[in-house]
Image (cartoon, rainbow, N blue to C red):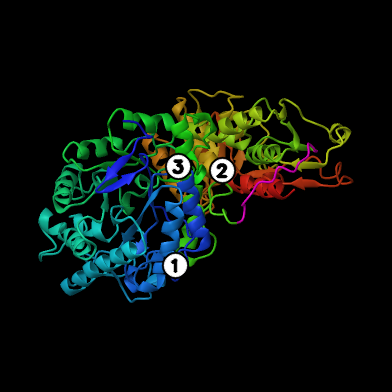
Amino acid sequence: MGIETQGKIGNLTIKNRFIMTAMGVGLGEHEGRATDDFIAFYGRRAKGGCGLVITEITRICEGNGIGEYDQLSLSSDDNIESFRKLADEIHKYGSKIFVQLQHPGRETYLKLTGTDMLVSSSSIPSVVSNEPTRALTVSEIKELENQFGDAAFRAKKAGIDGVEIHGAHGYLIQQFFSANDNKRDDEYGGSRENRRRFLMEIIENIQNKCGKDYPISVRLSSTEFLDKVGIKSGITVEETIETAKALEKAGVALLNISAGTHFTGSTIVEPTSYDQGWKIPFAEEIRRHVSIPVAATGVIREASYARDLIDSDKIDFVALGRPWLCDPDFGNKAIAGNDDDIRKCMSCVYCFDTAGESLVSGGEHAKCAVNPEMGNETVYTELKKDGERKKVVVVGAGPGGLEAAITLAERDFEVVLFEKNEYLGGQLYLASLPPHKQKMRYFIDYATKKLKDANVDIRLNTEVSAEEIKALNPYAVIIATGSSPVKPSRIPGIHNKNVYTPVEILRKDVELKNQRVAVIGSGLTGMETAITLQTAENDVVIVEMMDVCGTGGGQTVIMDERSTLAKIGVNTMPGHRLIEIKEHSIVVTDNADIEIEIACDSVVVSLGVKSENPYVDTLKDMDNVYVIGEAQAAGRRIGDAVHAAYQLAYRL
C-alpha cells in the first residue's frame, strides 16, 4: 500500500491517498454560490493530484447558520447548479469531491447572522466573540437535523460524491459533544450517548434522504486539550473512540480526525512552532478501534512523511490543508518523488491572517505567503515564456527578490541576482533562526533549487554599485534591498558598545551567554529574539511601552510566542518606556511617569525597521527600475513582498 494507491470510502474509489481538508478561503459568493474563482481554485488542486477534495464549510440554513461572509450555502435549491459546475470541474481530473456541511453554533457573529442571539447546546457564549447565546430548543434541533439532511440531498443532486459533517473545532456539533459546553438536562445532554445524539440523528436524516450508500465523512476533534488550561470536562481521545465506534455502527464511511477547539485555537491552525505530525498519534489510536478508513491531519509538510504514514499503515488517508495552498501540485510531485520541487508550507499562518477579517466582513480572500497564484487562478492563467533572454538585475535576495528572480527566469529572462550577505533569504533567513522556526527556511530551500535549475547568476557577498548595474545594460532593474533595524538616536546610550540589534543576535554576530539582557520592544522580532537569548542561558526581560506585549503581526503567531515566553520564564514589562541606556542598567518610566532602573549587562533594541534603498538617486535616470517589498515601505510581511514581486515579474 502506497500513497499513490487507490483507496475506498464506502462504495467510492479514491484515485490516491491524498485528501484536501476544508479551509475557509473566502472565494465563495455572499449568497452561497460557488464562483468561477472558487471552482478554479479547487479544480487546480484536483489537477495537482488531490484524490478527494473537501470544500470549505457550507451552511445548511440561513440566519444562525451563517458562519462566514462569503460562505457556500446549500440551504435552498438556488445554488445547486453552481455546485454541479464545481463537481464537474473536480471530476475532470479523476478526483472526487465532498461538501463539508456545518453549523457554527456560537462560533460566529451577530453581524453575520442578523439575529438577536447566537445558538448553542447551552447558553454559554463563545470565548472568541463573547456574544449573547441561547440554548436551542428540541424543536429547533429537529429542524436543524432536517436541514442537514436537505443540504446533503441537494449536494447529491448536484453530483457531489459525498458529504462531510463538521463535528470538530468547537462548532455546533462539538458544542453538543463537549460536557464543558453542553449543560442540557434533556435527551441531548448529560451522558455521552445523549451528547452525541444530535450528530447521530443528523446522520440518520441524511441516510433517509440520500440512501445509506451515499458516503458520509465526519470530522472530529480527537481531544479539545482543555485539560491543558485547567478544565477537566473537555472531550478526550477515550471519549472520541467511543464516538468513532458509534459512527461506524451508524454507517459513516470516513473519519477525518483533527483536534482542538476555539478555546485552544492554535491547535486548530498551528503556527510554525508545532512539530510535523503531532496530531497523528491521536488518529492512530482511534483507528485501532474501528474498521472504516481514518484520515488524519497535523502539520504534515513533507512528502516523505506523508508517504511514510501510508507505507507504515498508520492511517488510511493523508489529510492536508495549507500545503495545497502553497503548492497545488503537492500530490503529483509527492507521488513522483519530486520532493525538492514542492513549495512547502512554513506554517506562517499568513493565509489565516489575510482571511480573518474578510471571513466576517467580506473583501479580500485568503492569500498564501509563498504562492501568489493561490486564489488568483483566474487572474494568473498562464506564465508566458516571452523574456527572450533580456537581462534583468534583481538587487536583494530576500523573499521578494527570490520570487522575482524565479518568475523572471521561468519567463526566459536572463536574471542576475545580487545579495550583499553570504546567504539567501534576507529577513526570511533571520526568521528561521530562533528556536522552533526552522520551517521558515522551506521557501529559501525551494527558491535555491529553482534558481540553480534555471542557471540564474547568483552573486552573494556582493554590494553592487549603481555603476556596476548600469554596466550590465539591463532591460529592467528590481530593487528588493529590504530594511534595516532602527536605533533611535534620541535615546541616551543607544550607541553604547553593549547595545545590539536583533539581527546581530539572531545571526550570532554577537553571542551572549549568562547575562542579564533587556530586550526593548515586543513585536514578533523582539519576542523571538528574547526567546533565542533565554534559551541560550541568559536572564531576559522584555520592556514594551504598550499595555500588552506582542503587538502587530498575526495574532495566532503572537499568542504562540507569548505562550513560549511564559513557559521559558522570560520576564515582561508592558506599559514601560525606555528613557536611557547606561553601562550596567536601563532607565524606564511606567504609565505614571515613575522612573525605574533595571540592572542589565546588555540591551537589544527591537524598535522596528526602516527601508533600505541606496539607489534612489543613483538609478533615477534609468528606465524600468522597480522597487518592491520593504525597500518600498518598511514593515511589510513576507507574503506582501512575494506577492508584489510575482505581480511585477508576471507582467514585466
Q: Nearer the viewer, mark 1 or mark 2?
A: 1
Mark before the other along the chain sequence, 3 or 1: 1
Q: Residues within 10 Å of mark 2 (few under 14, many from 20)?
A: many
Q: Is residue 205 above or below residue 382?
A: below
* Residue 112 in which image quadrant: bottom left
Q: Main secondary structure of the magenta part?
A: loop
Q: Nearer the viewer, residue 27 or 383?
A: 383
Q: Give, as a single range, the part of the protein colored magenta.
A: 379-390
Kindly identify the residue that appears in the image at 16 percent across and 39 percent down: 289
- Residue neighbourhood size for the residue with mark 1, other residues' Cα within 10 Å, grouped as few (<14), some (14–19), many (≥20): many
Of mark 3 and mark 2, the one earlier in the sequence is 3
Residue, disc 3: 49
Gap between marks 3 and 1, in whole Å?
25 Å
In the image, residue 579 lies at what x, y percent?
A: 60, 44
Q: Which residue is mark 2?
A: 370
Residue 118, percent from left and from top: 31, 70
Q: Quadrant of the N terminus?
A: top left
Would residue 380 be counted in the magenta stretch?
yes
* SS under mark 1: loop
